[in-house]
Image (cartoon, rainbow, N blue to C red):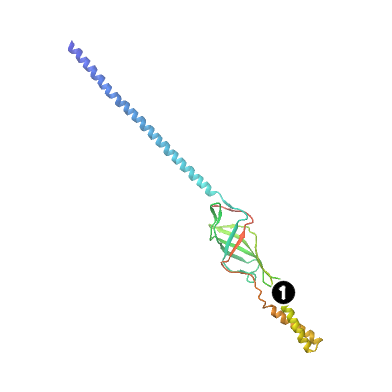
Amino acid sequence: MRSRLALVSLCLYLAFVLIGCNKPASDNTAENATTDTQASSGKDEKGSGGEAHERKERAQHKEAKREPVVVPAGTAVTISLGSALGSKVSKAGDNFTGSVAKDILVGSTVAIPQGANVSGTVTDAKPLGRFAGGASLQIRLDSIDIKGANVPVQTAAKSFTEKGKGKRTAVMAGGGAALGGVIGALAGGGKGAAIGAAAGAGAGTGGAAFTGNKDIVLPAESDVTFELSQPVEIRR
């Protein structure tokens, strides 16, 4: 009887021992599984959040890239001429080409890069006259090629003038006439004086052609600065 009770007690004891040993292991496993799940979930959330942030930044960058840059009116545009222009060699309606001489910035953004091709028109060209008056040349910038797109621009016309040396011409012509008068007097006055005066006027006119007056010439690669009269919208 006692042996049987002892055996039952021993079995119960072993059962409790086994239950006690297995329970913590089960709890630890569950706890570890919970921790792993939370860590995995946090990692997924972090990764998902990072991807969303990157997508947002890419979208913002793309949107900013699509927004046009506006070069305001009054901006100076300096170009380098591709060929010579002049009051004598050019005529109204002639086209000219060139390139942008330096970057044009809007804030910190290069709106129009140096080297961009440009085209323009000669709106007026008058060579220097022999007598009073002067030479004049007027040119206008029409368009700028930006990344393959021909962008029309509106600028104030650039004018160049050269005054004629009228006083010097008059003195030379007067001197010729006076000399003609002397010749006429020697010829006997009257009709001879009239002939002499005409001859003197001719001599004065001939002298006027060599007074040193010059026409306007803008050599190739000369820098000319225009001012935008209207804003220019540039799409990127």
Q: Which residue is mark 1?
A: 167
Residue 192: horizontal and vertical position, in percent?
79, 87
- Residue 8, image quadrant: top left
Q: Residues within 10 Å of mark 1 (few under 14, many from 20)?
A: few
Q: Amino acid at mark 1?
A: Lys
- Residue 32, image quadrant: top left
Q: Residue furthest right?
A: 190
At 61% from the left edge and 65% from the top edge, which residue is drawn?
A: 95
Q: Is residue 125 above or below residue 39?
A: below
Q: Is residue 230 left or right of residue 5?
A: right
- Residue 227, image quadrant: bottom right
At 56% from the left edge and 59% from the top edge, which residue is drawn?
A: 145
Residue 81: horizontal and vertical position, in percent?
58, 65
Q: Is residue 103 above or below residue 220?
A: above
Q: Is residue 121 left or right of residue 2?
A: right
Q: Residue furthest top?
A: 1
The answer to which of 204 and 6 lies nearer the viewer is 204
Q: Is residue 19 above or below residue 207?
A: above
Q: Under tag 1, what secondary structure?
A: helix
Q: Is residue 156 left or right of residue 64?
A: right
Which quadrant is the N terminus positioned in? top left
Q: Is residue 201 above or below residue 83?
A: below
Residue 205: horizontal and vertical position, in percent?
71, 79
Residue 201: horizontal and vertical position, in percent?
74, 81
The answer to which of 126 and 188 lies nearer the viewer is 188
